[in-house]
Amino acid sequence: MTTDPMPFGLRAAALRGTGEHREAAASWLAARWPLLATAALLGVLTDLLLAGPLTTVLDVRIHEWMGALPHTGPDLVLAHVLDHTGQRWLVTPVVIAAALWACRRRRSWSSLWLVLGTIFAMNVVIAIAKFTLDRGLAITGDPSLFVPNGQAFPSGHAANAASAAALLVLLVARARGTRIRRSSALVAVVVPSTVMTVVSLYLGFHWFSDLLAGSLLGVLMVRAGAAVEGRLGPRLRRRRPRVSTPFDTDLPETEAARLASARAADPARDRAPHAQLRRRPGATTA
């Protein structure tokens, strides 16, 4: 694998005006977004632990601004309906159904193991963070840590919405056997994450940093799950070779390969099986 000796900034500047700088920027971002998202998530966590400006100033101001907005009946009904799109009991069956569809199209169970493993690992990480940090809920107005019955950081709804959107993009691409454009995949993940963030802020359920961390965690867990499945997928998709015999007996790989090559070398065996019967010397046919 060769590396581009020219830095990204210089390469983008050289391509500017040729119509290729956008493609170069998209390729650079597609290769490095997991690193950037991890850095952003660690930054939010560090700010929370050190009581930085994001979690002590910006979170409070956004919460107060959202609370000052008029909360009418139709708006609240719509917000509560949209908030349910981030609940685990709703998004998990949808993602599992898409995984089964991809499994049927690919004739492999690896997509289902990817979904189940990602959802399980993500919820374990969220539970550990919630019960360890005990951040105060936005409804109480206290953004500090180690508050009894806190469990606000990170947002499970945001993580569920982002991970479900990312998994659906991945599974649809697998089932159809095509690659989805980066811009389409980005929109498919960013839109539900943004909707969940705005709705939760409008209802006063979470702080902004909770929702940001949840969304980043959701997409990163899907990326990690896809990387693990990429290593284990060939083993999960590997099927034991079978040879059609009268007793449908499983044979060792070497024996199966030997019989397959013998059949390929003797096509008359398939056209006239009776001609391949072993006869005694001097035997005559009826």
Image: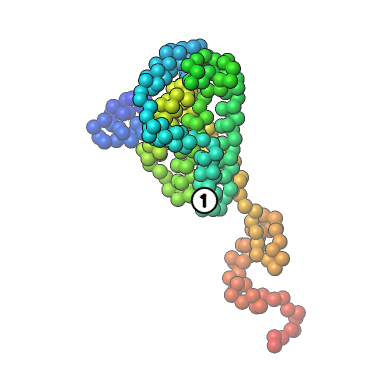
Q: Going by the image, does 144 lie left or right of 180?
A: right
Q: What element carries label 1?
A: helix
Q: In which quarter of the image is residue 268?
A: bottom right
Q: Which percent across, then down, holds residue 159?
A: 50, 31
Residue at figure coordinates x 43%, y 48% from the top left? 178
Residue at image position (51%, 53%) is 105
The residue to which callout 1 is attached is 101
**Amino acid type, residue under disc 1 in the picture:** Trp
Left or right relative to 279: residue 22: left
Residue at the image point whose x is 71% and y is 66% from the top:
247
Q: Residue at x 29, y 35 (%)?
A: 20
Labels in figure, total? 1
Where residue 179 appears, x then y in whole percent?
Answer: 42, 45
Percent x, y of residue 5: 38, 27
Q: Is residue 28 above or below residue 257?
A: above
Query: x and y percent of residue 120 in the render?
Result: 59, 35
**Is residue 164 depicted above or below 109 in this figure?**
above
Looking at the rendered image, the quarter that the C terminus falls into is bottom right
- Residue 72: tell me if it is visible: yes
User: Which residue lies most toward the left here?
Assistant: 17
- Between 6 and 222, the one nearer to me in the picture: 222
Q: Badge 1 local density, few (<14 within 10 Å), some, or many (20+)?
A: some
Say which of 185 and 266 sits in front.
185
Q: Can residue 37 be seen in this view?
A: no
Q: In this view, does 283 lie to the left or right of 67?
A: right
Please identify the residue farthest to the front as the structure is shown.
73
